[in-house]
Image (spheres, grey):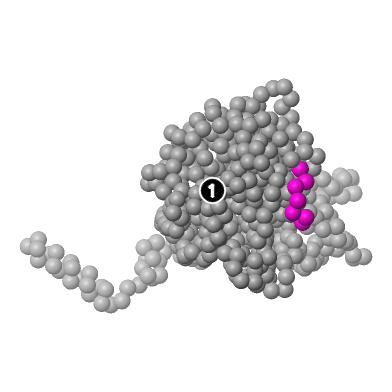
Amino acid sequence: MAFDCNKTRGVSSPDNYSSISTEGTPIKVNPSTQCGKATNREIIYKLDIHKSSDVSIPGVCEPKKDNGTSDKATSSICGIRCFTDLPAALVCEILARLDAKELGIISCVSTLLHTLATDHQGWKKLYCERWGVPNLPVTLDGPLIPGGLPDGKAWKTFFVEREFRSKSFLGRFNVDVLRGHSDDVRGVILLASANLIFTGGHDSVIRMWNMEEGFLIDTSRPLGCTIRAIAADRNLLVAGGTNAFIQCWNAIDGNKNLFHISGSGADQNSEFRLWGHEGPVTCLALDPLRIYSGSWDMSVRVWDRSQMKCVRKLMHADWVWAVAPRGNTVASTAGKDAYLWDVRDGELTNIVSNAHVGNTYSLARTHLTNVLFTGGEDGAIRLFDVSEVSGDEDIKPAATWVPHSGPVHSLAFEYPWLVSASSDGRIALIDLRKLLNPKNSSKRPFSIKNIDASAIEPPQRMLHGFGCDLFSIAIGADRIVCGGEDGAVKVWNFSEALEIEKRAQALKSLRQENRMRRKKAQVEMNASGRRPDQCSIAMKKNQLKGDKSVTWHNKRAINEKVKS
């Protein structure tokens, strides 16, 4: 794993200083030619190489032994050299070999290493590996610079907040019900970056909801067909149904809700249609450059977003049920099989035959590695490794879960959670943290073949209470949204779990701070030669008022009277 390293970093000055730039701020460390004159401030950031017998850096602490050099002089030279005296490119490469946990540990060693590890661009790669490139809002001055973040946040802060939020799905939740559709809901999409939810179904209209408040924002005109698929980002909203066309809405500049789907007023030019399929459109997906659509005409069409025309047609042997793009590849399911295509030349690179008993209805992918999650008519969820060309050999599932008693109609993935919706009216939440982050994964390429069986865990949570078929599901931020046969859209809100976890962590930090303060006071007492009683220290730290002592005496007196 290699991170971006600015080539302008680490230019040595004539004084033999090693300069390492973090986010545009150069940090100079002491030169090796002046090791004997290092100040106390510089020594704070030194790594004592003598105390670490397991780690040695070639060329840093290996002076040649000769008769003219004493052991004491050698020890002095080795103890003064600093980790940041290494070339800047080498420091970046070393930090690039660490995962998120190890970078966090490094940042606790010293102030200088904290600055280096916090501002390191590796956090950007770690974030994008888990959640992809974030959908950032457009500012008043135009779009954000690619790779930039709002509010001046560092990538580490962005990563830690997202990782913390991902733990909320094991906590408390509230269920909000959005009512408005008159028939079953076949498609839902959650656009958390814009605080929006889009839904569509058998009543042939698209509805746009506010994610936080749950109120209806806008409703499209009837499209004259059952809406079976919806996809959206901050620039484009697309919907497809049984009439074989793709209905599209461009985002409108200055509109706080991005889209005006009702089609009335001066914004009618933002709405248009794409024609090309010869059967019902069953699935849709977007990436920054393309639109992907699958249909019962046994094809997946790839559309260029800049020209809004079909540039690739991928033929299958059966009805297409699901599509999932990633980079320059797109995965699809048709009949019982799953396919992997190269979008650039339209070549079929891999195929999973008989992925399920019955149709393979749903599909999901992750940014971490080239694997497919499939859900089928048999109620099973399977994991397939498609990183290598299978040739004539059938690809076997690397992991299988059977949490449902009915067909799995929809899958959604947001690291580390895979969620599924089934006709049995239940939602399964599977934590893939151990499965997708095996030990030493940062030192060698990720491979399904190296996964320990103990890493395959059963679903951590099952959400019940629907009593009807569920057709579509979406996950994002701290919400899970699903739609089903009863026409209601249910939103599982886990934001309360985040607040509870924040309070628990604050209390934990306070307790740890108090323990450190008491330990420091005890060390100072021992250093001065006194050995006070622990209870007396606690009483001095937490002295009660006089009225409290009176209350104690009163209680003791009452107890004595009762005994007598």
At horizontal 75% and vertical 61% (from top left) the residue drawn is 146
At horizontal 67% and vertical 43% (from top left) the residue drawn is 277
Structural crowding at the residue carrying mark 1, measured as other residues with C-alpha within 10 Å and reported as few (<14), some (14–19) or many (≥20): many
Along the line of sight, the residue nearer the viewer: 50 or 430: 430
- Examine the image and state in which quarter residue 406 appears: top left
Q: Is residue 307 magenta?
A: yes
Residue range in magenta is 306-312
Left or right: residue 126 compared with residue 377:
right
Position above or below: 498 against 340: below
- Residue 131 in view (yes/no): no
Q: Quadrant of the C terminus?
A: bottom left
- Examine the image and state in which quarter residue 391 appears: top right
Element under disc 1: loop
Task: Give residue 447's position: percent from left, percent from top.
Answer: 67, 34
Task: Give residue 206's position: percent from left, percent from top.
Answer: 54, 57
User: Mark 1 highlights which residue?
Assistant: 226
Task: Give residue 263's position: percent from left, percent from top.
Answer: 60, 65
Name the amino acid type tagged 1.
Thr
At horizontal 68% and vertical 33% (from top left) the residue drawn is 316
- Residue 305 in view (yes/no): yes
Q: Is residue 22 magenta?
A: no
Task: Give residue 559's position: percent from left, percent from top.
Answer: 14, 64
Along the line of sight, the residue nearer the viewer: 309 or 209: 309
Left or right: residue 190 compared with residue 338:
left
Q: Quadrant of the N terminus?
A: top right
Residue lying at the far left in this picture: please name it.
Answer: 564
- Examine the image and state in which quarter residue 80 appears: bottom right
Residue lying at the far right in this picture: please name it.
Answer: 14
